[in-house]
Amino acid sequence: MARTDDTVRRSLLRRGLALEYATLGWNAAGIAVLAVAAVAARSVALAGFGLDSLIEIGASAVVVWELSGTGEERRRRALKLIGGGFALLAAYLLVQSTWVLAAGLRPHPSPLGTAWTAATAAVMLALAAGKARIGGALDNPVLRTEGRVTLVDGLLAAAVLAGLVLNSLAGWWWADPAAGYVLVAYAVREAGEVLLGGP
């Protein structure tokens, strides 16, 4: 019975690691795609979402370390770095979004950004569901928590997508920096939870 339990646990760990590696790969590709799209469209929301992808890579790396048996102290240090990254992201987006609104800068439509954020929303929601399921089966709070981060990442992709579509179809240029403010709220919350030891 114990051997069966160990076999099941190892299988679940492999699946959990596979989900994290898929998240890492997608976000690594996203940084390049979003950088090109953000510069071409002059979009603060796309630039911020690209930075969020970088932070998500760090979050996934923490889970890979934890699932591989990395020590508690190293995980705490890594989480503090992720919290600092979220704080920097919030500060950048707050300044940039406010400047764009005050100056009335109008981002261009971005077919590339629209396609990527739509795909990202679908992929992240699917990965989040898998992490919640595997994390629950393993009774692993780290994987479950990072799964919630992935869920929010998918919701953020949907928010950025909405801003891009509204700008492209209705000419609501302010929807782009407004999506940036959504990212600010998320980044501040995540920074607080990590740095202040929240849930």
Image (spheres, rainbow, N blue to C red):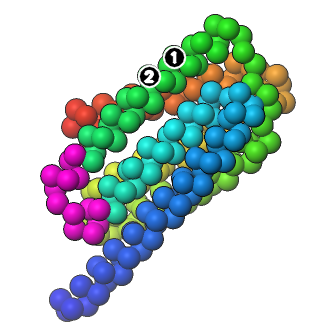
Give neighbour class at mark 1: few <14, some 14-19, many 20+ (Cα, 10 Å). few
Residue 91, quarter of picture: top left
Q: Which disc, if any, is residue 137?
A: none
Q: Residue visible at 66% across and 48% down? A: 33
Q: Is residue 158 left or right of residue 84?
A: right
Q: Is residue 126 left or right of residue 41?
A: left
Residue 1, quarter of picture: bottom left
- The three-letter code of the residue at mark 2 reads Ala
Q: Residue visible at 24% across and 85% down? A: 6
* Residues drawn in magenta: 65-77
Image location of residue 133, percent across then percent down: 41, 65
Give neighbour class at mark 2: few <14, some 14-19, many 20+ (Cα, 10 Å). some
Q: Main secondary structure of the magenta part?
A: helix
Image location of residue 59, percent across then percent down: 38, 50
As drawn, which residue projects farthest toward the top? 102
Q: Secondary structure at mark 1?
A: helix
Foreground residue among 13 and 87: 87
Q: Is 141 located above or below residue 170 in the figure?
A: below
- Residue on which disc 1 sits: 95
Q: Which disc, if any, is residue 91?
A: 2
| Residue 160 visible, this angle | no
Q: How many marks?
A: 2
Are circles 2 and 1 on residues that touch, CB within 8 Å? yes
Q: Residue visible at 53% across and 28% down? A: 182
